[in-house]
Amino acid sequence: MTPHEPDDPGSHDPAARDLGSHPPGSHASGAYDAVVLAGGGARRLGGADKPGLRVGGRALLDRVLAACADARTTVVVADPRPTVRPVTWAREDPPGAGPVAALDAGLRRTGADRVVVLSADLPFLGRDTVRRLLSALRSGGTDGALLTDADGREQPLVAAYSAAALRRGLASLGGAHGGLTGLPLRRLTAALDLTRVPDPVASFDCDTWDDLAAARARIREHGHVLDEWISAVKDELGLDLDVDTGVLLDLARDAAHGVARPAAPLTTFLVGYAAGRAGDDPEAVAHAARKAAALAQRWAAEDSAGQPDVAPDATPDTRPDAG
């Protein structure tokens, strides 16, 4: 990973940078902004730097940022730090004023009609879940769509909202309480019409050391470890590419069995290199993998035929040492 060093929080002002091609209220197809709340005190973790804790070799914050990588603008409400990709930084005033104040600070730096709001401690959140929330928001005609956990509890920090509904709610709360400091998030969401989307995995958050241990154990289970490892490598190398891992695994198997075991990693490396030169897209990878797999199968077929590689009418070898 090449971390993106934070600039001055004001240097990524959406008004100056992100909103140039997408003005406030933009209805661009699929356009949304993301607000990630990453500035809590992590009291149940003894004050540890929770967004920086690692699961599968990646910081929790970076895992969340990967899940909303196609957001038009991503605002992280916290003190700036190196991240896996560029973001806009914001801070509630005063720092530590609570999630409602933090949400308000982040929302002020967005301009899309729809906003995905996330906490920074979601190890199993993926892009598919973010898209599912946005789809539920579009189709439901409500103020927002949020996940519910294994016990049916609402998770307002894994949700997609109408930005207008959030702004109205924040303005109403601020007026009623003389500010937003210290208000719980349920004061805001209780007044919203919400669609609930059950997902016990994506809604799992790391509030305690036991939660963190459980997350680290889960990604090493047989059914998850390969996808987790590929995602981690792509993030580390700065790759935004969806690859059919099954195709590459089949190729590695063919090269190992049909040629020699060391041929497997070397062949997959060469396929990746060829795909990068050809266009760096999933189809380029698949095309190169198919060609290499066909070659490995031809190679193996020669070995299994048990016949000398000479034409039927070739002149017999008359060398003195020829069998």
Image (cartoon, grey):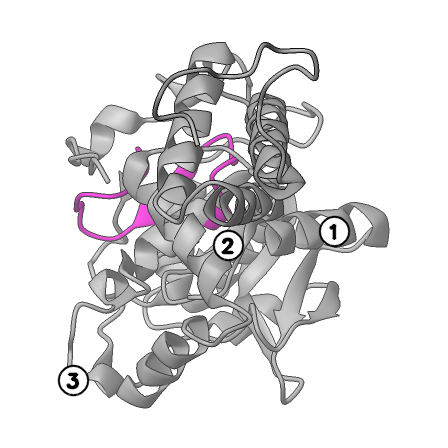
Residue 98 placement: quadrant: bottom left
Q: Earlier in the sequence, mark 2 or mark 3?
A: 3
Label 1 – label 3 distance at C-alpha? 36 Å
Residue 282: give x, y in percent of width and height.
58, 28
Residue at mark 1:
137
Whether residue 74 sits left or right of residue 291 in the image: it is left
Q: Is residue 158 above or below residue 215?
A: above
Residue at position x 43%, y 36% from top?
Answer: 268
Question: Is residue 176 visible from the viewing direction of this image?
Answer: yes
Instruction: Check disc 2 and give the amino acid type.
Output: Val
User: Residue 199, relative to residue 285: is it above or below?
Assistant: below
Which span is picked out in magenta?
A: 67-88
Main SS category, magenta section: loop
- Residue flagged by tag 3: what amino acid is it? Gly
60 or 294: which is nearer to us? Answer: 294
**Up/down of 31 relative to 220, above or below:** above
Residue placed under numbered mark 3 in the picture: 46
Residue nearest the viewer, comparing 312 with 59: 312
Residue 117 — which label?
2
- The span from disc 2 to disc 1 (Cα, nearest Å) is 13 Å
In this rendered view, identify the residue nearer to me: 102 or 78: 78
Asked whether 278 falls inside the magenta stretch, the response is: no
State which mark lies toward you, 2 or 3. 3
Which image quarter: residue 319?
top left
Check if residue 85 falls in the magenta segment.
yes
What's the residue type where badge 1 is placed?
A: Leu
